[in-house]
Image (cartoon, rainbow, N blue to C red):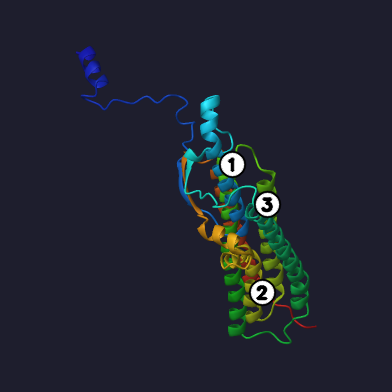
Amino acid sequence: TSSRRKQLCERGVLLPVRVEKEPDEDKVEERPPVGTIELGEDVFTARLLLRLGFMKAQSEAEEDESLSSDGERSSLLDSSNVMGLVVPEVEEGTGEHFGLMYGWAGVCGSTFLVQTVVLLIMLGNGLDMGGGECFGQPPTFSMWLLLHTSKALAMLVAGTLMGKELMDIANYWMVAELLMPTRSVEVVLTALLRVVMNLTLIGANIAIFLSLTNPAEVWLNMTALAFIASLGSDVLDVAKRGVFGHHIAKTMTTTNFQLTFVSEYPAWFAHVRRVTITVMTSVVISFAYITFKSADPMCQ
């Protein structure tokens, strides 16, 4: 009887069968497929997509020859991993191709240079602008509340926008890692410089907001700093209107910033996304609280 009961239990008649898991199954972290992602529309991402588009064209041109000669596919770019990547309608070796590759690189470099110069000016003169401000007498409660609420809200808005920029940079790097055969020095350097730029913008927001005594100046400074961060997108819009030439306008207008991948996320991406969101949320909330509770400068 006991053996019969044991057999019934093992077969799940009396008790559900316990499914034994393999020892390493819980340790393996599943990585979901990337699927469709929306890249940030700025000059730097456009430069990356431009390079990938030319690599795709060259890869497809060499594919038949590679398959017929040695049976190997081109190592430039595996276009079967991605959908939505647009090939520029420009022939290699022409003046238009030279203008797109090197002229657009100049546009990217000039954009970053302007961002850096404006940021340095804002850091220097913005701090000086607020350094001499003070209250002759303690502000009324309504004035205090308006000023400190403006500082906290401006900090939250600026931090949220910076978080979006940092995630755009992470997606920018991820696309390069998934599609390029080797790690690109240009992509790494551009991503790192953009991260430093955005962290400096957050620091500038904090330093300038703490020294201001006028709510209007708080929002004016936040708008000015947001302009620095969005300059890459604004220059791309200018290029689409034809300011930099017809071929650049045509290419940038047809560039697709929405790509669909069949591969999985890189192992590092989930950690980067988690750390970015956690750090940005903590920093923004902390400094929004600090700016709200900061003491007002009083004239001696």
Res 118 → quadrant = bottom right
Residue 49 drawn at (x, y percent): 57, 51
- Which three-letter amino acid code belongs to the residue tagged 2? Asn
- Which three-letter amino acid code belongs to the residue tagged 1? Glu
Q: Which residue is mark 2?
A: 221
Q: Is residue 12 left or right of residue 28?
A: left
Q: Is residue 185 left or right of residue 30?
A: right
Name above or below for residue 83 compared with residue 96. above
Which residue is rendered at x = 58% and y = 84% of the image? 142
Mark 2 and mark 1: span between their CA atoms? 36 Å
Q: Which residue is mark 1?
A: 177
Q: Say what secondary structure mark 1 lies in.
A: helix
Q: Which residue is mark 3?
A: 190
- Which three-letter amino acid code belongs to the residue tagged 3? Thr
Res 199 → quadrant = bottom right
Residue 105 drawn at (x, y percent): 68, 55
Q: Could you classify mark 2 by the number of other residues whose Cα lies within 10 Å: few (under 14), some (14-19), or many (20 or more)?
A: some
Residue 186 drawn at (x, y percent): 68, 47
Q: Quadrant of the C terminus?
A: bottom right
Mark closer to the chain start, 1 or 3: 1
Labels 2 and 1 touching (C-beta < 8 A): no
Mark 1 and mark 3: span between their CA atoms? 14 Å
Q: Is residue 285 visible?
A: no
Q: Quadrant of the N terminus?
A: top left
Mark closer to the chain start, 2 or 1: 1
* Residue most extreme to the right: 300
